[in-house]
């Protein structure tokens, strides 16, 4: 059981929750997720990435309201208890010396990369953070990530679909231009970490493949067990189906077989 | 302490809870969340002769009170099960039931013989009812003669407990149950998932990659409970109730309807501690009603019904 100690509404669609977990709860790794039982009326738990666990005994979740599970969670009062299983799943690869970590987040994909971003920033790693959103309002999520530093050790750039803030276009266009800029810097080689809608992940993976850059993506699938037992959450890889919950949720983009875009 | 032991053929269980096929994989996957010492037995994911990759995703769709799944019998196949998975399965501190499914009568016999030859395996469950495997003609689970043939062939290969798991996707489950009993099954599992589907209206496509899937969870309980009730009136081998059991009361309904044991599946996803909670609840009920053994609960509601019937006819 975990206790909801803080609930902050980032914007009407997105909430940042802080849970106090008991001592047996292992320290999560970036990329790992928890399974939340948000309502007894629901048959399945809902998986959410650990969006922060910097303080011991605390787990933060960044949640976009979608359906009943997320809405009932957002209706919980501070102080109430929620059953939270985990942490589950694998983690991201560490950037090696000389590598620049390039984080690409689309929309609520910020949730999957936030913990990683803070850990890397803490370790003093070189970091480029790219956040794409529909509008300026939706960009508020980006404020939950580490801010840019004056020495350029952490760089941050935004894009919006409607041009209301940052680059007018997709986050992948932003990624291309950041990679071009990094290419001129011969000492550093980029390593990509991506989380966001399927179309964005597919495009980022294609960019990484074309430039022969290592790229990891955090995937979402509907889950039941969360442990690899039920085989319900599979994705196609070059080695056959793999489960997002126990083989992932982080996958090497080069291993994935991306579906054709329905309207491409 | 009330006596919770249950007997299915030669198989003796410490309590009547069994974890349903396909919901706990081969066992170890869930070991960090489920306390297997609280359950009577677990059933493995259904094993087929060859490995199966399973259906295209999405494989799951939640629906009010239940879950649709179309996994498509993804499993490692008999060979890898025996050479690799069995070692892992054997670490589970509960009785082990291997679930098998073939595509011919012979395959059912071979699978049954092969898994029951291993001392780690205590019993076998014939899965004739997975709605996710396409078949050319009338589905096996709907054909009493085909089920009898499969059961007879499997029976000939083992002395260990042979469970036959029925499907609710038939107009005449009773004939299938009777055919299974006559062909030598030691117990009947009543029953598997009910065929169903949903459509994602935004995408304009079925929600499941396989279009249809099997409905499990609470929504299934009244259907399979009625099937247990129907079958318990006509067969004399033990029945294992399955479908939507999440609380002690759910398990008791099946037992009072005529089941000797119960299977828990979908409920584990929300609450991996459900089995322990159910066992405790059964014991509490027995104490409160002065019932010494769980066997004494089996079919109690039928006896009440019969007495009531006798009373009304005596008037
Ligand atoms: C590993 C992992 C990490 C995740 N991390 C986060 C996170 O940090 N923050 C966050 O807001 N969300 C995250 N998600 C997605 C989140 O689990 C779903 O948004 C949530 O389950 C929706 O529940 P609901 O009851 O509100 O919506 P539902 O009513 O169940 O569904 C509403 C819509 O969301 C889609 N959906 C449902 N479940 C999932 C799912 N598991 N994955 C993707 N789409 C789904 C449905 O297809 C439907 O279109 C993550 C998913 C996974 C698998
Ligand atoms: C994800 C999932 C996978 C399943 N796989 C199998 C299987 O391989 N073989 C089988 O006989 N039943 C399978 N079942 C059916 C269950 O064993 C059980 O009979 C059914 O779900 C009804 O019980 P429940 O409502 O308690 O889950 C599966 C069910 C689910 C939800
Ligand atoms: S959710 Fe069951 S295998 Fe991933």
Image: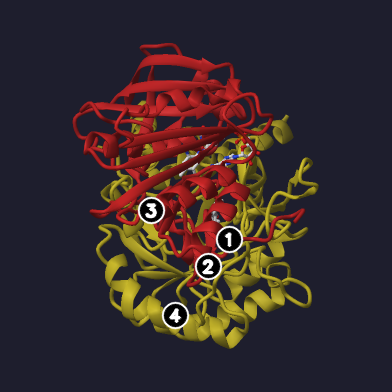
On residue B74, which mark appears? 2
Q: Marks 2 and 1: in contact by CB < 8 Å?
A: yes
* B15 displayed left or right of A222: left
**Label 4: element kind:** helix
**Residue B102 higher or lower than A264, as above or below:** below
Q: On the rendered image, what quadrant is the C terminus of chain B found in?
A: top right
- Label 4 marks a residue whose chain is B
- The Cα–Cα distance between marks 1 and 3, rounded to whole angstroms, is 38 Å
- Bin the neighbour count of mark 1 within 10 Å (Cα to Cα): few under 14, some 14-19, many 20 and up: many
Colour given to chain A in the rendered image: red
The front one of A46 and B172 is A46
Q: Which residue is mark 3?
A: A190
- The Cα–Cα distance between marks 2 and 3, rounded to whole angstroms, is 38 Å
- Identify the colour scheme used: by chain
Do we see residue B83 in this rendering?
yes
Nearer mark to the viewer, of 1 and 4: 1
Nearer mark to the viewer, of 3 and 4: 3
Q: Earlier in the sequence, mark 1 or mark 4?
A: 1
On residue B78, which mark appears? 4
- Residue B109: x, y in percent? 52, 84
């Amino acid at each position: 059981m975990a206790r909801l100690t803080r609930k902050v509404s980032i914007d009407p669609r997105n909430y940042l929750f802080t849970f106090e977990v008991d001592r047996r709860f292992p320290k999560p790794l970036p990329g790992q997720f928890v399974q939340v039982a948000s309502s007894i009326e629901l048959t399945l738990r809902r998986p959410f990435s650990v969006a922060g666990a910097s303080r011991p005994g605390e787990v933060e979740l960044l949640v976009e309201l979608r359906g009943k599970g997320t809405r009932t969670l957002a209706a919980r009062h501070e102080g109430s208890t929620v059953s939270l299983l985990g942490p589950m799943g694998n983690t991201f690869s560490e950037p090696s010396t000389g590598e620049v970590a390039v984080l690409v987040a689309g929309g609520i994909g910020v949730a999957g990369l936030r913990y990683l971003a803070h850990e890397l920033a803490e370790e003093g790693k070189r970091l480029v953070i790219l956040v794409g959103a529909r509008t300026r309002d939706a960009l508020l999520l980006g404020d939950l990530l580490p801010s840019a530093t004056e020495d350029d050790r952490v760089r941050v750039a935004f894009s919006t679909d409607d041009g209301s803030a940052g680059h007018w276009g997709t986050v992948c266009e932003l990624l291309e231009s950041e990679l071009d800029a990094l290419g001129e810097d011969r000492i550093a080689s980029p390593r990509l970490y991506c989380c966001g809608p399927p179309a964005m992940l597919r495009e980022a993976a294609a960019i990484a493949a074309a430039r022969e850059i290592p790229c990891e993506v955090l995937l979402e699938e509907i889950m039941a067990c969360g442990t690899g037992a039920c085989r319900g959450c599979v994705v196609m890889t070059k080695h056959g189906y793999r489960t997002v919950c126990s083989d992932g949720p982080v996958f090497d983009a080069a291993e994935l077989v991306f579906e054709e875009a329905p309207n491409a | 302490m009330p006596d919770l032991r249950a007997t299915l053929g030669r198989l003796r269980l410490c309590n009547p809870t069994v974890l349903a096929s396909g919901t706990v994989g081969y066992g170890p996957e869930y070991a960090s969340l489920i306390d297997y010492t609280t359950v009577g037995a677990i059933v493995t994911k259904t094993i087929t002769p060859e490995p199966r990759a399973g259906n295209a995703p999405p494989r799951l769709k939640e629906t009010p009170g239940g879950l649709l799944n179309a996994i498509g019998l993804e499993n490692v196949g008999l060979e890898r099960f025996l050479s690799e998975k069995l070692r892992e399965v054997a670490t589970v501190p509960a009785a082990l039931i291997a679930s098998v499914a073939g595509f011919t009568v012979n395959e059912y016999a071979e699978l049954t013989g092969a898994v029951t030859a291993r001392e780690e395996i205590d019993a076998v469950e014939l899965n004739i009812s997975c709605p996710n495997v396409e078949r050319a003609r009338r589905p096996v689970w709907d054909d009493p003669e085909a089920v009898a043939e499969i059961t007879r062939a499997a029976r000939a290969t083992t002395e260990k407990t042979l469970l036959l798991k029925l499907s609710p996707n038939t107009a005449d489950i009773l004939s299938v149950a009777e055919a299974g009993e006559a062909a030598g099954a030691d117990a009947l599992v009543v029953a598997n998932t009910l065929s169903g589907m949903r459509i994602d209206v935004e995408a304009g496509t079925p929600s499941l990659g396989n279009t249809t899937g099997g409905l499990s969870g609470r929504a299934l309980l009244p259907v399979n409970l009625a099937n247990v009730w129907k079958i318990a009136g006509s067969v004399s081998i033990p029945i294992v109730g399955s479908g939507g059991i999440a609380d002690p009361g759910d398990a008791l309904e099946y037992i009072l309807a005529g089941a000797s044991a119960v299977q828990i599946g979908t409920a584990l996803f929300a609450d991996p501690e459900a089995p322990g909670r159910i066992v405790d609840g059964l014991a509490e009920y027995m104490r409160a009603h002065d019932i010494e053994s769980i066997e004494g609960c089996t079919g109690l509601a039928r006896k009440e019904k019969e007495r009531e019937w006798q009373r009304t006819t005596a008037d």
